Amino acid sequence: MREGRIRGPADVDAAVIEGASARVRPLLMTVATTVFGLLPLLWESGVGADVSARTAAPVVGGLWSCMVLTLLVLPAAYTMWRRGQVRRAMPAAPLANTVAVEDSAQTPGPAEASTPDAREQEPPPVDAGATAASEGPPVTPSPTKPDSEVSS
C-alpha cells in the first residue's frame, strides 16, 4: 500500500491495517506512562486524597477509552465509509461479456454491421470523485450580462 493509491476495497483494508498498526506502540506507551503516573494519586490516603482521586480517575478512564476509540472504533468506521466510496466510484463490470464472446464467432452481415449493438457499446467513464449529489442532467450556465452592463 506504499504507492498511495486506493483502487479497490482490498486496498482500503490494507491502508487501514497499515495505519492502525503504526499507531499501536506510540499510543500504548502514552497511555501506560500516564496511567502509571496517576496510580499514586488514585491510591493516596493523605490530606486532599479525595480531590486528587476524583481528578485522576476521569483522566485514566478517558485515556483507556481514547485508546480503544483510536485503535478499534475509528479504523472500523473509516473502513466502512471509505469502502462505500470506493465501491460507488468503481465502474460497473459489463454483464454481456459472455454473450459478446459467443457472438464474436459469427461474422455480421452487411446490414448488421451498420447498426451498433447495445451489448458492444462501452459504458460511460465513471469519475472517481463523483458523488450521489452530482448525478443528474448537466446544468448549462445561463447567459449573464458583464459587470459593466449591470445597472444598480
Image (spheres, rainbow, N blue to C red):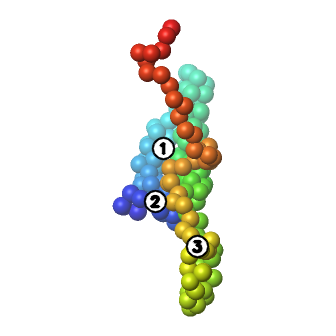
Three-letter amino acid code of the residue under disc 2: Ile
Between disc 2 and disc 3, the foreground one is 3
Residue assigned mark 1: 31
Q: Amino acid at mark 1?
A: Val
Mark 2 or 3 closer to N-term? 2
**Is residue 137 in view?**
yes
Q: Residue at x 59, y 57 (%)?
A: 88
Q: Secondary structure at mark 3?
A: loop
Above-or-below relation of 123 to 54? below
Screen quadrant of the N terminus:
bottom left
How would you rate the neighbour count of disc 2 (Cα within 10 Å): few for under 14, some for 14-19, many for 20 or more? some
Q: Which residue is mark 2?
A: 6
Pick whichever, 148 or 36, lies toward us: 148
Pointer 3 residue: 116
Depth check, mark 1 against mark 2: the one in front is: 2
- Distance Cα–Cα, label 3 vs label 1: 66 Å
Is 133 located above or below residue 99 in the figure?
Answer: above
